[in-house]
Amino acid sequence: MNIKVASKETNVSADTIRYYERIGLIPPVKRTENGVRDFDDEDLRWITFSRCMRDAGMPIEALIEYLQLFRMGDGTIQSRVDLLREQRNELQDRIDTMQSALDRLNYKIDNYRSHMVVAEKELKPFE
């Protein structure tokens, strides 16, 4: 399949797919005689995996490191697990921070008249 179809199948833009290939987040994609990328199911799995990790907030550098470890074989399994655990912990920290912000916003919304209006009246006006 061409890049347009691969993009639609994975819900990842063609530009992002090209970028992922250029920096090594996905293996080089086979090309037709005319040089057009010809994606197969394995390519789609790599694209989906990379997008999932990026959506989880994994930095590109960490993902590249993970893939380098993967290419090195089974001797790096513990290192890969450790890297994924580290990324999970960082994601959980971001989720906790966002949950705290959401809780605070919900409190402000739910108590706007009794809390926010009173607090706003005590603020200095903008000059």
Image (tube, rainbow, N blue to C red):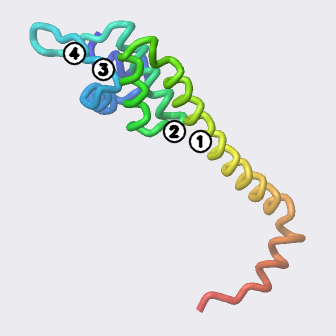
Percent position of residue 10, x then y: 43, 20
Q: Residue furthest left?
A: 34
Q: Which numbered mark, 3 or 4, is in the foreground of this view?
A: 4
Q: Nearer the viewer, residue 63 or 69?
A: 69
Q: Which mark is residue 37?
A: 4
The residue beneath circle 2 is 57
The quarter of the image holding the N terminus is top left
The quarter of the image holding the C terminus is bottom right
* Discs 4, 2 touching: Cβ within 8 Å: no
Task: State the CA–CA distance, disc 2 to disc 1.
Answer: 8 Å
Task: State the CA–CA distance, disc 1 to disc 3.
Answer: 33 Å
Q: Which numbered mark, 2 or 1, is in the foreground of this view?
A: 1
* Discs 3, 2 touching: Cβ within 8 Å: no
Q: Which numbered mark, 4 or 2, is in the foreground of this view?
A: 2
Task: State the CA–CA distance, disc 3 to disc 4.
Answer: 10 Å
Q: Label 1 is placed on what type of residue?
A: Glu
The residue beneath circle 1 is 90
| Residue at left offset 40%, top offset 27% | 12
The residue beneath circle 3 is 4
- In primary-sequence order, the first of circles 1 and 4 is 4
